[in-house]
Each structure stands twice: as C-alpha cells, then as structure tokens.
Image: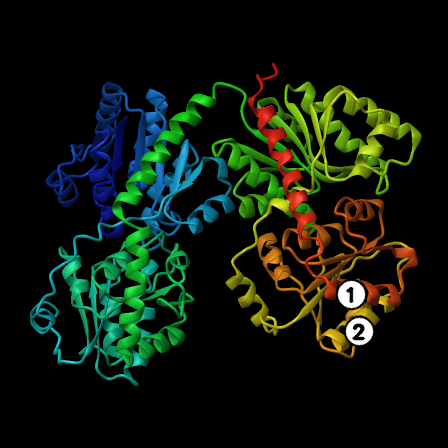
Amino acid sequence: MKLMHIAGGGDKGGAKTHILALCSRLKENNDLTLVSLRSGEFADDAQAQGIKTKTFFTRNIPMDYVRLIREAKRQKPDIVHCHGAKANLAGVLIKLFTGATIVTTVHSDYRLDYMHSFLKRNTIGRMNALALRFFDYYVTVSDNFKRMLIERGFSPQKMMTIYNGLDFSEKAEKPDRKTYLKERAGLDYEEGDVVLGIPARLNPVKDISTLLRAFALAQKTVPNLKLIIGGDGEEMDKLTSLSRELGIDKSVSFMGWLRDVPTFFAACDIDVLCSISESFPYSILEGIREGCAVITSDVGGMRDLIESGESGYIFKPGDYETFASYIVDLALDPDKRRRFADRLYDKASRMYSLDSMAATQQGIYQNILTLEQRKKDRDGVLICGAYGRGNAGDEAILQAILDTMRAIDPLTPLCVMTRKPKQTELKHKVKAVYTFNIFKFLHQMRSARLFINGGGNLIQDVTSTRSLFFYLFTIWAAHRRGCRVLMYGCGIGHVKRGLNKRIAGSILNRNVDIITLRDPESLRELDEMGVTRPDIRMSADPTLCLTAADDERACELMLQRGLDPNGKYICFALRSWKGFSDISPFTEAAKYAYEKYGLTAVFIPFEQPADIPSCQRSAEGLETPHLLLTGIRDVELLLAVLKRMTAVCAMRLHALVFSAAADVPFIGVSYDVKVKGFMEYAGNPSVTDLRRLDAGWLKSAIDKVMQDPHALDQVVERLRTLERRNSEAARELLEQPRRQ
C-alpha cells in the first residue's frame, strides 16, 4: 500500500510521538512517505528513525503547496493521511487537484487549538475547521473525540477510532534522582520527597494553573512534595508568577522543553494531567511505562484506561480540591502508588502497545480501501422503526438489529430513521435521519441495499391509521427504490379496519422479500390479510440476542440509587392504558412479595416519561420498602439491572422479553394481544388479562415463580435459537444480487 503522511512539522509532545511512532511501524509493510511542512527537529527525528521524509519549507507557502500537489501526483498514493491544521489544508488541496482519498487524525479539539491567539484562531483555526468538512475519513484517538465530531455534524460512517500506542519494551534507565532533580530541575531534593511530573505545552488548554493550585493545597498536608513541569509556551510567565503567589516556587521547577521524556518520568513518583481537553494523552502512557502512578483530569479516553480508585485517580477538569485530595492520598501511601502503577502497566502494555496501534491503523487503511471500492455500487442498510421516542423496548430492538448487521458485515453503512437523529447518532455511532423527513429517507433508499422494517408492532391501526399508512409507504418506497425489504422479528397487528387490512395485505405481498415474526398471533394476522407472497418465517424478538452490561455497572448504579446489589428484588414494569386505573392489585402483590419472600419492589418505567405516573401511583400506596428506578437509557445496563431481580411482573412487552433475555422468571399482565401472544409463544402460563386482574392471581403467580424459578430455562433457550433466524434472513438478502 502506498501511503503519504503529512504533518505541519512543528509538532511536539503527544502529536509528534504519535506520528513518528506510527510511521516507524507502518513503513515496514507499506511504501510510506512522511511530508513535513517545516524543517527542523520533527523532520530530523523522522529521518533519524529511518522514515522516508520529504520537507517542503521555503517560507513561500503557496509554492510549497504547489510542490506538494506535484509530489502527490507523482507518487499517486492510495491514501493521504494528514495530521494537524496546516496538513489538513494541504490534504484538501491534494484531494481537489488529484482526487486522492484523504484521511485526518483528530489529535485535539480543533476549536481549542489556537485559543491563546486571536489572530491564529480566526485565520488558520477557521480554515482548519472548514477543511475538516471535506475529508473522506476521520481517525479519532478516543471515543470522546468521535462523540465530539458527531455532535458537530460529522458523519459517524466516516469515523474510525485508534488508541495511542507506545513501545513498552524501551524503558529508561533510572537516573540518580537526587542528581537529576538538583542539576536538571534545580530543586532541593531530599530522600523521601514525593515527586509529581507533567510534560506539557504551557497553554490554556493544559490548565497548568489548576495543577499549581492543587499542589499548593496538597503541600499543606504533605510538605515533602516536589513538582517538575517540562514544557514551554505562552503561559510561562503567568504560571511562574502564580507559583510565587501560592508560595510553592521553591518546590516547583519549570524545566522547559524536554528532549528525554522517559528519563523525566523515571525521576517521578506520580504522573499528573490537568487538561481541559485531550485526545488520548501520550504523557500518561509514558509515565505508566516508567512506573508512575497516575492522577488525571477526565479527558480523552482516560476512563477506558483507568478505573478511578482502583488503578489511578480521575477528577473533573478544574476541580483542584479533589485533585489535591488525590495527591495527598497517593503521596502518603507508597504501597498504593506501587499497586496502582503495576495495575496500569499490566493493562497499558497489553492494550496500548505500539504494535497494537500500528496493526489497528493498518486495518483502518484496508477498510478505507474496501469502502472506497464499494462506493461504486449500491451498499448499506436503512432501518425504520419507532425509534427516538424514549421507549426502552424499541431502542433495544434497534440495538439488536445494529449489532446483527455489524456482525454480518462490519463495514456496511448503517442509517436509522428516528425521531431524534442527533441522539441516535451519538448513542449508536450510525448515520440517522428524521423519521418523517421524506426527502432524506428517499435519498437513503436510493443507495441502500437492504431496507429493514425494524421489529415491534408497526403494522397495526390500534394507535392510528396514519401510523399504519406511513410504515406501509416506507416499505413500498424502499422496494420501488431498489432495496431488498426485510420485516425483522416483527409483530403484526392488530389491524381492525377491513379496508386497512386489504391495503396492508396488498402492499406487503407486492413489496416485501422476507418477513420474520416474533409470535404466532402475528402469523394469524398475516393470514387474515392474505399475505402469502413474501417468505414468512417464525423467529423471536430481536432483543433476546442482546448482551447485558458488566455486572459491575449494574452494582454501581444500584448503589447510587440506594439499592443493595446483593438484595432480593421483584421488578414491576407498568404502563398507562385506557380503562386501567386500579393499581391496587400491584400494590398488594408488592406488599405480599416483601412480607412472604423478602422481595423489595423496584418499579421501572420502560417508556419514559409515559410510564412514570403508573409506577409512581403504585409505589406511593406501599408501606413496605420500595424504589422507583428512572432514567436508565442504556439498554445493556437495564438488562444487567434486571439480572439482579428475583422476578419481574410486567405489562410492557419488552420488560417480559428483557426478563427472558436476562434469564429472570417473569409474570405477564396482558393489555394487548401482543403480550398474551409472547407469553403463549414462550410457553409461560403466568399471564392474565388486564381486565380480569386481581391481587389474588398476582400473589399466586409470585408463589409459582418462587417455587420453581428455573421452569422456563429450556423455553428461553428455544426462543434464542429461533431469534437467529432474523440474522439469517438479513444475511441472505444482503448476499443476493442487488436489485436495479
């Protein structure tokens, strides 16, 4: 593969380390040229590492760009990879004049890069922000930066994440610390002093003033603290003045730019970071490699690396008081420092190695070339459903479908029709369009290979005829636009009106390729409509394939909400429904479960805010312990919480399905045929009609669950096997020849 990397050439710190480390590995398996737009240290170090380097620097910037474009035309690289603002401008020009595929690595928040300079912020800063919009692909060095780009309107389909990597085999020799700190740092070091260190540019983004305030506060408790700061920048005078004002100037050393960062960290006990914004800071990895404990602000991908309180400490940017308390804690406990440092070294050396970073980047390049080739033909999946309305069941269906599509083909472009496009993009990292923006979803249908009518009971007129006709229209339009059409693990009905049945039957017969159904009642509905032409298969609800979040996350949430993770609970998932006003049966059942079995009632509204009033009314009538658990938007976390329940009693269909997925016994109260249909399909007799509900029946159902909690294990496994038919149908349609 022929690669051209372009850098501004003035790069220092983490960006420089990333570019040179990456290129030094990638050159081994690729024809790689590194272009520097400035002569000096960066270009010299690149050549010293054996990287083929070209420098374009004559102080005539337009002519430098012309020469660079000519070089790109001569080399004809497969991919041009840019790093930083000046390189990004060059990359866009290369794309304009050569048609090359251009990629940029987002090393920082581009809106903060020149916050110290009004002139640069409003010239090169604004030009860079504009240039970024023209790139073909973006490599982000943390999920936080991917989220940032999505929030600013960049397409999730063009983003790939790579975490910084370091060669952990090249540790520095331990210096004579006393000599190093006295001669190089100018500090009066004594044996037993605890040394903090940070290498950083001295600009506002790094927020060194927060570090100085935290250090001053911590030194009141731990007088033998020392701080060394490696770096230079426009805030040097301000920071040195602040250190004098705080009375810590005798214990703080501003060492200027460092040539030997490993030795710097080898002289430290604690690696600190206090930035307002970062990608994935190399200085943390460099400190970990040399055996430092870590205290860092909550930036970049630090939470992916550090478990705060277990392997290091993370504080909110600017919170110098919490920062100070962490400094004191580690300064006074050398055993904890060593323990934290060892845990971080073990994790970082496995997950953030230089070889791992290079392999990931190589894979990204291969994916980009594949995607560029696939651009020439129809590709991608458009998913339509009742998404973006706050219903946990619908969001779980979407998550399950997306997981399945990614398992079938990780490179397939995915687009979702949703009521809240921005929220869906941020949560699921996919492209999203507003459900009722007809022009946008018709445009997506023109390029999509497969259209998925995404689970749930969309083909029904109980809610409204308008809703039925809208979903039928999307199916018709997708077929007319050349998509294969799959109705995915769906429920059908109830369609009450005769005319609506005839229209629905006609459209489904003429425009759908495969229908997978989640219950037998839906098959009966299709029979009544006369739907016979599509390939109809019995499956199960897509959410049965979801995986719960880590148990630790569920325990943490429960503790935050006042629940003992080891307690015994029964969950109630209620909803409002016409004619449903008497909540006393649920209140009495909750009281009974506590008094007889010691089960504390937990009320979880599955659709928020719609379900909250019903749950509140039932909870307010209870004198026994109970809790209303609201605000859980993460489907995997909700599943993990349900796994901590002893039993679930639910009106909501997906509360029952989630319980099956979590292997928790469930009791159903049917307000609609779909609830009763699922319970029958699951072979669970513990269901009653809402109109006949009474406390006695609920108590009896709870007794049965407690007497035989594993009665449904085999049934649930059968449902999971059936659910796989959904993904089989999707794979089959994606592999069929494209419809023209």
**Residue holding disc 2:** 592
Residue 143: % across, % down: 43, 49
Task: Residue at 13%, 45% (x, y): give it.
Answer: 41
**Three-letter amino acid code at disc 1?**
Ile
Camera-side residue: 543 or 31?
A: 543
Q: Which mark is residue 702?
A: 1
Mark 1 closeness class: few <14, some 14–19, many ≥20 residues within 10 Å: many
State the count of labels: 2
- One can see residue 448 in this view: no
Q: With respect to residue 676, does 487 lie above or below?
A: above
Q: With respect to residue 32, does 684 lie above or below?
A: below
| Type of colouring | rainbow
Q: With respect to residue 375, does 285 lie above or below?
A: below
**Three-letter amino acid code at disc 2?**
Tyr
Q: Would you say the residues marked 2 and 1 are in contact, meaning their CB atoms lie under 8 Å apart?
A: yes
Camera-side residue: 30 or 92?
A: 30
Mark 2 falls on what kind of element?
Answer: helix
Residue 523: % across, % down: 80, 33
Residue 705: % across, % down: 74, 62
Which label's residue is closer to the chain start, 2 or 1?
2
Task: Residue at 87%, 63% (x, y): give it.
Answer: 697
Task: Residue at 31%, 30% (x, y): give it.
Answer: 80
Image-based side of 150 in relation to 249, left or right: right
Residue 690: % across, % down: 88, 56
Residue 1 falls in which quadrant of the image?
top left
Residue 398 falls in which quadrant of the image?
top right
Mark 1 falls on what kind of element?
Answer: helix
Residue 294 falls in which quadrant of the image?
bottom left
Q: With respect to residue 467, does 684 lie above or below?
A: below
Camera-side residue: 661 or 258?
A: 661
Image quadrant for the C terminus? top right
Q: CA distance from mark 2 to mark 1?
A: 9 Å
